[in-house]
Every structure is written in structure tokens, then in C-alpha cells.
Amino acid sequence: MKRLFVLNGGAAVKPGNKSAYLKFDDPLAAFNKGGINTGDVLVYDATLKALAYDEVRNLQFSHAANEALWPKDDMYDATVIRGSNYLTETVDLGHVVPLLKKLKGNVVAIGVGAQAGKYKKLAVPKGTVEAWKIIADKCETIGVRGFYSAEIFNDLGIKNVRVIGCPSFYRSLKPSITIKSIDPTTARIGLTLNKYLSADYASNATKTNRMQRALIDAVAKRPSSRLYSQGEREETLAIFSTGQDKQNNIKAILTKFNLLGHPEAEEMLNNRMGAFFDIDEWAADAAANVDVMVGFRLHGNVIALHQGIPAIFFTYDSRIRELASLFAVPSIEIEDYLPINLEKTLERADFSKAQHVYRLNYAEYHRFLTENGLHHVLAKPVAAPPEKPLSTPNLVQVPHGVQEAVGWFRSEIDFMTGEVETLRNRAWNLETALRAANGKKAPEPAAKVAV
């Protein structure tokens, strides 16, 4: 019997060990406590589909210091670390080091990555550095998701890495994919959002949220469009709740994006949203209801792309940028901060590069699993692995007329000016309250500065 131990699997495993899902007796209770990233479950699901083991056991990193949960010596043939953001300045894996030292056999990380809002060198915690050096000694290669991640490992003195992307891209297990064509005027749009992007997860939070607002405005006006929640709290609660609770969650979403009073957006949130905890069901729903996926969730887009459904990425952090570039997926960079013209974007998205590059990356993934001694079911590649780095953004170039651009930037400047005024008033009220509390005279109002 072939046994697999998984660090941070993060989900339940179906019989047959080929699918992952979140098991909830009460989704409302779970999401009232907070959001859950179902993209992580997709990564795990895709990993399981590629591997061939009779028994699979999970252990979360958060429980890795509990020796009672450790596998017994020689109990498992290999250990796999599910890919995620394990190279950051804020995550210390020092508590995992004793377990890593104890583990027998290969310890293979699949699709691990560095995380930052924008390109920079990372001051990785010492515990994390020690953990990855142990892992590097227990595998042939570490599978990293892009060239930024490979660079950070190199900075740590870890050289045995292979750039494979994310396992989720290969969920179909096919050595090639054919991306379906798009009719820009009638295409059914699948939309993915992420309301809380900042710090290490966005190079510019304001631009990211404003671009999402513009995308909601455009997509919601298509009656066939559909919004997918990837575990966001308010979106998922709005789907599973009723009555006033549902409306309160919808209002919270609209308020976040300054869309209160937008009838199409409100209607979409009420009637055209989906959230799935079973990855097979999520994929099937996208296949049945979406002609093209656009948005701000990596795996919310990949759930379409691996099935040959076109997906256009909005890039805003190191993870999205390196994966979109590695797979040559059509993308829009939020730092360009240009108006969204949905129909022109669909017209100009070129997926021919993505189809070609996928075959090369698949071959690299196949080589990675094989050289690390993992039992897998991947078909023989139809292309050779890449001879040189594959990392070129496939940006969608959309021409904008003068009137369209002026209208966009005028409305954005008006919004930003209002935000500055709101912050100024809050600061004034706080200063006044503090002085009153201390028995001091309130200061004279400051002269307004033109913005």
C-alpha cells in the first residue's frame, strides 16, 4: 500500500484520494467566524488528482508542533507540502522544524511561493530559512511557482528548485489545453473579487479596489454574468443567508466598493452569486455557466482556465504577477490604472501564447514529480520542458479614447478628493475630542489645501 503524508492539506479528502472539499455541517456558522480561502482547497485537489496513493493523511502547519500527530517512522512513503505562500517576512515556520527533522523519506513541496505586494528582497524569518534548508536536503528539487520565488530561495542559499507554477493549472491532467473562443458581445462572464487586498497582497490597495469597482460595474450590466465567492466572508454569507441578514451582507459588499444604489450590482449580488466547498462541484458550475472568467482571485480564474475556459487575470501582487507571466495568461496590470472596457478587453485577449506555454510547463511539472520519486498519473508530455525561462507578461492592450479616459480619471479624482476630505474631517474631529477630554481649547481649523 502506498501512503502519503501531507503537510497543510487543508481540506477533507474524498474516497479514492482524488478530490478535496471543505466539510461544513453549518456554513453560516463557519463563515460568521471569518472567511476561508477555497483556492487553497483547489490546489490540494489538483495535487491529489496528479498523485497516486492508497492512503492520504493531512496535518496542518498550525498543529505541526504536536508530536502526538506526527507519523510513525517509515509509516509513509513520502511527504508532500501543499503549495502556498510560505516565503514571506511575516510567516515563521520555526515550529515545524522538529517535525521536518523527524520525517523519513522524501519531503517534496509542490508549488510553494514567495509573497509580497511588489518585487523586493525579503527578510525571511530564521525559522523559515531553517525549515526550507531541511526540506531542500530531503528532496531532489523544490517545486516553486515562479521566478520571483526561485530568486528568493536562491537568496537563502537554496539552489535545487524547479519552476513548475501551481498544481491547480494542471488539474485536468492533460499535457495540452485548448482555450475556447470568446464572443465579446454575448459571452457569459464569471467574476471573482477580493475585497481585502493590502500590504503583502497588493502593490496598491486603493487602485486594486477601484479597479474591482469598475469591473463590477461592467460585469453586473450583463444579465448572464455570475459572481463566484472564493470563501470571502460577506459574499458567502449573502449566498447562504436569507432576509435581513442577506441584505446586510450585500450592503457591506456594495459599501466596500462604493456601489450603494447601483441596481445591476445589487441584483447580481442577490441572484447571481455562487460559492462551492466541493472542488468538483465548483468546476462543474463554471463549465456550465461561464464563457470567460475575469477577476482578482487567482484560483477563481484557474477553476475555468484548466478546463479550457478563457480567463483574464488582474495582476496586483507578486504571486499573481509571476504565475500570470509564467503561463502567459492574458492579464491587466492594476498599476496601469486605466478604464475598463469589457468588450474590448475580451476582443484583444490572446490565448495562443498560453496554450503553447502550458505544454512546456506541463512537461516541467511531469519531470519534477518524476525526479522526486512521487507516484503520479500524469500522461506523457507532448513537448519538452522549456530550455530557457518562461516569464513574459501577456498584457491585454486596450485602446481608450480621449473622452473615455478623461471621464474615468475625472471620476477617480473626484472620489479621491472626497476620501481626502473625509480623512481630514476625521482627523479634525479626533483632535477636537482629544483636546476636550484633556480640558484644552480646540485648535483653529486648518486652511484647506487644493487637491
Image: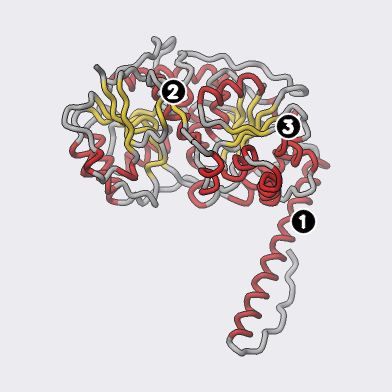
Amino acid under disc 1: Asp
Mark 1: few, some, or many residues within 10 Å (few <14, many ≥20)?
few
Residue 121 visible to the viewer: yes
Give residue 449's position: percent from left, percent from top. Answer: 73, 70
Amino acid under disc 3: Leu
Rendered position, 385 above or below 264: above
Q: Secondary structure at mark 3?
A: helix
Relative placement, left or right, of 436 versus 175 is right
Question: Which residue carries the number 3 mark?
Answer: 342
Contact between marks 3 and 2 (CB within 8 A): the answer is no
Q: Residue furthest right?
A: 403
Q: Secondary structure at mark 2?
A: loop
Contact between marks 2 and 1 (CB within 8 A): the answer is no
Residue 19 — which label? 2
Question: Which residue carries the number 1 mark?
Answer: 414
Q: Earlier in the sequence, mark 3 or mark 2?
A: 2
Rendered position, 228 above or below 437: above
Relative placement, left or right, of 218 versus 173 is right
Q: CA distance from mark 1 to mark 3?
A: 23 Å
Return the residue nearer the eye: 343 or 9. 9
Q: Earlier in the sequence, mark 2 or mark 1?
A: 2
Residue at x 70% of width, y 32% of height = 272
Q: Earlier in the sequence, mark 1 or mark 3?
A: 3
Return the residue nearer the eye: 163 or 249. 249
Q: Indicate the quadrant where residue 314 lies.
A: top right
Give residue 73's position: percent from left, percent from top. Answer: 16, 31
Q: CA distance from mark 2 to mark 1?
A: 48 Å
Q: CA distance from mark 3 to mark 2?
A: 34 Å
